[in-house]
Image (spheres, helix red, strand yellow):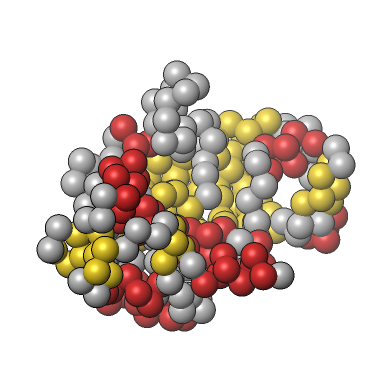
Amino acid sequence: MQQTNLKNRFIRLVKVISHSGYCSRREAEGLITSGKVLLNGNPYKEFLIQPEEIKKLSINGKKLSIQKTRLWCFNKSTGLICSNSNQYDKKTIFEVLPSLLPRVVTVGRLDINSEGLLLLTNNPSLSSFLEHPRNSFIRIYNVIVRGEINQLNIGELEKGIVIDGIKYNKVKIKILNNESKIKILRITLVEGKNREIRKILKYYGLKVIKLKRIQYGPFKIKSIEKNKVEEIENCNLIKILENIGFKNEDNFW
């Protein structure tokens, strides 16, 4: 119990410094141990700090800048992975993002064969908030499939289903066309397990031809070009975050 309280009250100072854009985490470690990080004008050599103390920090006589929470909508194309390293020898989304973008994390992921809306934020706490199952933010997809649509048990899916030992919560499906052999489905999820839509549709004998996310929570893709980003204006973002219950602005990390 005591460890949990400490985790809630303290954050890593190297993460604070690196997210401010001052330097990397490794360089931040050197600044801390060499006494160049000051708290109220005095050397601060601890590696944990309370969030309310961050505004009192300075480095080399310069006050540490604190970022405001920002959020971008990115229209991901297929062929890109959401990892921040190319360990799989695949091109990552971070290779196509604008160079002037600050350090960001993704809100959830889209696999290499999926496209559409991917949220990016400079605030990891916001990313965790939007991803957490308890907050039940909807994810909406347009999915093109091939196969016998009659096999799809929409009523069963709306109650939740277990496939290969994995429990999937309720899935809402709307069939957008009834004439072509190629069907277009509007699928709504309240969580995003790994390749959830593909696994569910395969279970019912349907092959996914195209999968595109068009909405995540209150954020929609609109008309953003592929592999381009569009930032949510700060005044609008503040209102949206208030409406969805994100009140953790002080705990940026």
Q: Toward which corner of the image does residue 97 lie, by quadrant?
A: top left
Q: Toward which corner of the image does residue 92 lie, by quadrant?
A: top left
Where is 96 relative to 157, above or below? above
Q: 192 or 117, which lies in front?
A: 192
Taking the spot 75% from the left edge, 34% from the top edge, the residue there is 202
- Image quadrant containing the C terminus: bottom left
Where is 177 relative to 164, above or below? below
Taking the spot 57% from the left edge, 65% from the top edge, the residue there is 7
Q: 190 or 23, which lies in front?
A: 23
In the image, 120: left or right of 246? left
Where is 218 relative to 206, above or below? below
In the image, 202: left or right of 21? right
Asked whether residue 203 is in view, the answer is yes
Image position, residue 245 (x, y; %): 51, 79
Image position, residue 48 (x, y; %): 44, 61
Image position, residue 52 (x, y; %): 38, 77
Image position, residue 138 (x, y; %): 59, 62
